[in-house]
Amino acid sequence: MALEPQTGIRVPAAAAVLLAMAGGVGLAVQSKLNNELGLALQDRIGAALVSFATGFAAVLLFALAMPSVRARLGGLAPAFRQRSYPRWYLLGGAVGAFYVFTQTAAVGAVGLSLFTIAIVTGQLVSGLLVDKFGLGSGRPIAVSPLRVGAAVLALAAALMAAVPHFDGGGQHGLLLVLMLLPLLAGLLQSVQQATLARVAAAHGGPAISTLLNFGVGVVLLLALWLAAAAASGRAVLLTPEWWLYAGGPLGTLVLGSATICTASTGVLVMTLAITGGQLVGSVVLDVLWPSAGSIVDTATLAGIGLTWLALLLAARPWGRRQAG
């Protein structure tokens, strides 16, 4: 039986969109921080582990400090016994861990804007299907011509912003390979966000689903890091650049905003809203804090404008009719 979203995790559509936009800006900042942490540690898996572990600690402290959330922790065992949601939903944590790893591996080489484009492309492809089957909101959301048009427009915006990266020669093959990691992460991320929304519905709020997501991710990344450290004989997770450790806690806020927006509007609108904030944040960071692959020009700015137009189209009420 499909889980219905609970009123405690749903907000008006306009507020949900604004929340997701803010989350998108935070996601761009998190991507940059995690990439810089990977460079500082000279360990991509270690940087992903640190990001997830600090995020898990932040959510756990929040859960223990809030009486209402702390009370929901007691419902974890009954929820598992009653199979309130499929166990495979917990694999959303594995998707999150893979996404953070792609941040540490690809952002520096291809630039934050191009990284974001690859993520968005994957999300747009999978977001329509996730909404079609009602995985995120608990109800099918029709794939109307307006919604498809909005997705196509956003995809065109992403391609427009990508063009400068392939002008003037260079290692195009390497760029395409490096885009595969965030592209795959984007394809999986819509499913992750949808399943997190359903887990949140079962527990009455996003705090528990976020905690489970980070917990699963920490376990998987720790196992990978221990294996890599044993093979290399190098195990360093500390750097004096303390601000680079802010990526994990920031990620918890981003994930919470995405979960709430998914339950309130569906995966496609959430994806487009986060895309708008993420692209703006990425461009600003590429200008103020550039990496080797950072490129910002007229095509990039035009792509942002088209993405915002796609967001407005997809967010219109008649673009979100439920399937009959």
Image (tube, helix red, strand yellow):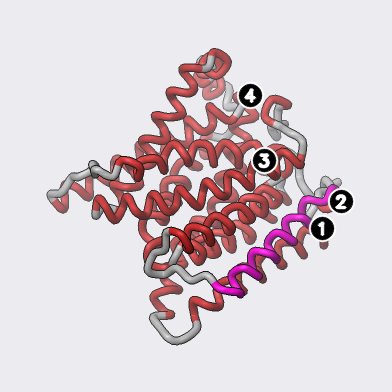
Task: Give the alpha-carbon distance from disc 2 to disc 1, as whole Å.
Answer: 9 Å
The earlier-in-sequence mark between 3 and 1 is: 1
Q: Residue furthest left?
A: 233
Magenta span: chief secondary structure:
helix
Neighbourhood count class around disc 2 (C-alpha, 10 Å): few under 14, some 14–19, many 20 upward: few
Nearer the camera: disc 3 or disc 4: 3
Specify the quadrant of the image occupied by residue 293: bottom left
In front: 212, or 134? 212
Q: As shown in the figure, which amino acid type bears the numbered disc 3? A: Cys
Give SS at disc 3: helix
Instruction: Please report the residue visible at 69 percent of the width from the left and 64 percent of the height from the top.
Output: 305
Residue linked to disc 3: 261
Q: As shown in the figure, which amino acid type bears the numbered disc 2? A: Trp
Task: Give the alpha-carbon distance from disc 4 to disc 2, as whole Å.
Answer: 28 Å
The quarter of the image holding the N terminus is: top right
Q: Residue furthest front?
A: 288
Task: Give the alpha-carbon distance from disc 4 to disc 1, as whole Å.
Answer: 30 Å
In front: 18, or 56? 18
Residue linked to disc 4: 204
Task: Give the alpha-carbon distance from disc 3 to disc 1, as whole Å.
Answer: 20 Å
Neighbourhood count class around disc 3 (C-alpha, 10 Å): few under 14, some 14–19, many 20 upward: many
Residue linked to disc 1: 144
The earlier-in-sequence mark between 2 and 1 is: 1
